[in-house]
Image (cartoon, helix red, strand yellow):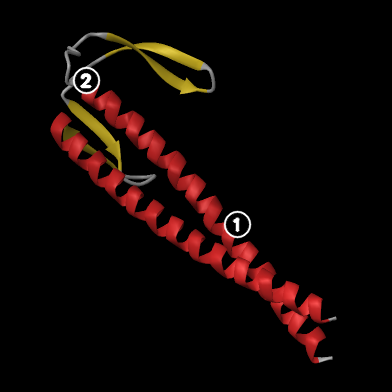
Amino acid sequence: MESSKNYQEQLLKFRYLKEQRGMYQGQLEIINASLGNILNTKTTVENLKEGVKDGDEILVPIGGLASIKASIKNPEKILLSVTQDVVIERDLNGSIEFLDKLIEQHNKQIQFLRTQLQNLDINLQETSNLIQGVIGQK
């Protein structure tokens, strides 16, 4: 009877830990995707410093597979989305500094999530071993 109760408790704990792990894994994937976008943005801004001039023609994506031709106006000023509703203007160097801070924040979040995942993996292994031990007692 006690063995069955212990088995049920360990099984519930195992399921909970698996759900937690899935949640953290999903967050890690989102942060990694966001970091990739920020790194691409930084590369683009750095490339602007290398000779884009007023009036140069570029392609601007407008969604899906569609783009339009556009002319650069004031290439030394970058508009950065801070939130969904807030955009700030920075010069090229200020933009790169802003993006570097975002990259640093993302890297800290990634490290935190990886640590959490490692801890959960250890707990999952220990719980699995306990479950196997209870099954072996039956």
The answer to whether residue 37 is left or right of residue 71 is right
Q: Nearer the viewer, residue 63 or 34?
A: 34
Q: Are marks 1 and 2 in contact (CB under 8 Å)?
A: no
The secondary element bearing badge 2 is classed as helix
The one nearer the camera, 44 or 11, is 11
Q: Which mark is residue 48?
A: 2
Badge 2: residue crowd in 10 Å (few <14, some 14–19, many ≥20): some
Q: Is residue 85 above or below residue 122?
A: above
Q: Name the residue located 36 percent from the left edge and 45 percent from the top edge.
A: 85
Residue 80's place in the image compared with 111, above or below, is above
Secondary-structure class at tag 1 = helix
- Disc 1 target residue: 22
- Give residue 120's quadrant in the image: bottom right
Which of labels 1 and 2 is toward the front?
1
Q: In the rendered structure, find residue 119 and report the number of the disc placed on it.
A: none
Residues at marks 1 and 2, CA–CA distance in whole angstroms: 39 Å
Which residue is found at the position 34% from the left and 36% from the top? 38
In the picture, measured across the screen, residue 127 lies left or right of residue 52, that is right
**Is 48 placed left or right of 115 in the picture?**
left
Give the residue displayed 68% in from the left and 76% down from the top. Answer: 130
| Quarter of the image where one finds residue 15 | bottom right
Q: Position of residue 135 (x, y in %)?
A: 80, 76
* Amino acid type at mark 1: Gly
Q: Residues within 10 Å of mark 1 (few under 14, many from 20)?
A: few
Image coordinates of residue 77 in percent, x first then y, are 18, 28
Quadrant location of the C terminus in the rendered image:
bottom right
Query: x, y (%) of residue 26?
Result: 55, 51
Which of marks 2 and 1 precedes in the sequence? Answer: 1
